[in-house]
């Protein structure tokens, strides 16, 4: 019985296609890096992800590097994702300053866990990793982006807060987040929804 041998050009073409697909794929830890150029400014956004809670709140995290000095001064999403979007930071609360309405629903406790601080940024009384102090979220007017410096938005620090969400975000889904910048044009990034 004769054997089939594919032409060498077909094998070489298939190998090239596999290499091209591999180079376009995410790296091993799931991070997706996006390079965006806006006029003279260039931005690199890495690992944009979000999580949400049944309480109608969610948080978005990512790393961003700008080629020029700039600042994030606002953000927005489609109203099907959230009615209100704010820039927040998690900080040590002064004694008695923790907003009780935020306890258990902040960006660090997206799993609805009632024993608090599973991710290190809740106003819950669990002081692990915070030197014995309570933590709370505060809205910030802007997030500075010094030229060439990577700014990290992460649980327990700076983040984009999604409020008045009509429904929980579905794990594995994606949505667009538009960042309003102080000097550059608005920057739209794609956010992946995951647990952590």
Image (cartoon, rainbow, N blue to C red):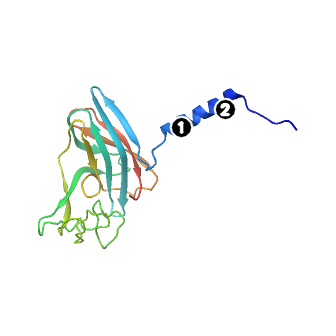
Q: Residue at x 25, y 65 (%)?
A: 122
> In the rendered image, which quarter contains the N terminus?
top right
What residue is at 29 percent from the left and 70 percent from the top?
A: 116
Instruction: Tell me the number on the disc at residue 11.
Output: 2
Direction from residue 6 to residue 25 in the image, left or right: left
Front residue of this view, candidates 162 and 45: 45
Q: Is residue 184 above or below residue 130?
A: above
Residue at screen point 39% across, 41% down:
33
- Numbered circles on residues, count: 2
Residue 102 vs residue 4, the one in the foreground: 4
Residue 63, image x, y percentages: 31, 45
The answer to which of marks 1 and 2 sits earlier in the sequence is: 2
Q: Which image quarter: residue 157? A: bottom left
17, 82: nearer the viewer? 17
Task: Measuring from the top left, give residue 134's x and y in whole percent.
Answer: 18, 67
Q: Secondary structure at mark 2?
A: helix
Question: Can you name the residue that lies furthest to the left here?
Answer: 95
Residue on which the image places disc 1: 21
Per the image, label 1 sits on a secondary structure element best described as: helix
* Residue farthest bottom in this picture: 115
Q: Residue furthest right?
A: 1
Q: Residues within 10 Å of mark 1 (few under 14, many from 20)?
A: few
Of marks 1 and 2, the one in the foreground: 2
Figure check: 92 above or below 61: below
Give coordinates of residue 194: x percent, y percent.
Answer: 41, 55
Residue at position x 36%, y 53% from top? 50
């Amino acid at each position: 019985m004769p054997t089939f041998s594919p032409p060498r050009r077909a094998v070489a073409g298939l190998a090239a296609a596999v290499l091209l697909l591999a180079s376009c794929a995410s790296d091993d830890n799931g991070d997706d890096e996006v390079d965006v150029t806006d006029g003279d400014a260039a931005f690199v956004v890495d690992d944009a992800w979000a999580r949400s809670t049944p309480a109608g709140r969610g948080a978005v995290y990512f790393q961003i590097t700008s080629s020029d000095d700039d600042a994030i001064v606002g953000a927005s999403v489609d109203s099907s994702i959230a009615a209100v979007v704010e820039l927040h930071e998690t900080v040590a609360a002064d004694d008695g300053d923790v907003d009780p309405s935020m306890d258990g629903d902040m960006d660090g406790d997206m799993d609805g866990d009632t024993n608090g601080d599973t991710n290190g940024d809740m106003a819950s009384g669990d002081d692990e990793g915070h030197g014995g102090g309570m933590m709370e979220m505060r809205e910030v007017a802007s997030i500075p982006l010094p030229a060439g410096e990577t700014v990290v938005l992460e649980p327990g620090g700076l983040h984009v807060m999604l409020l008045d969400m009509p429904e929980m975000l579905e794990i594995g889904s994606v949505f667009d987040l538009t960042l309003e910048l102080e000097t550059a044009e608005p920057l739209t990034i794609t956010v992946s929804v995951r647990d952590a």
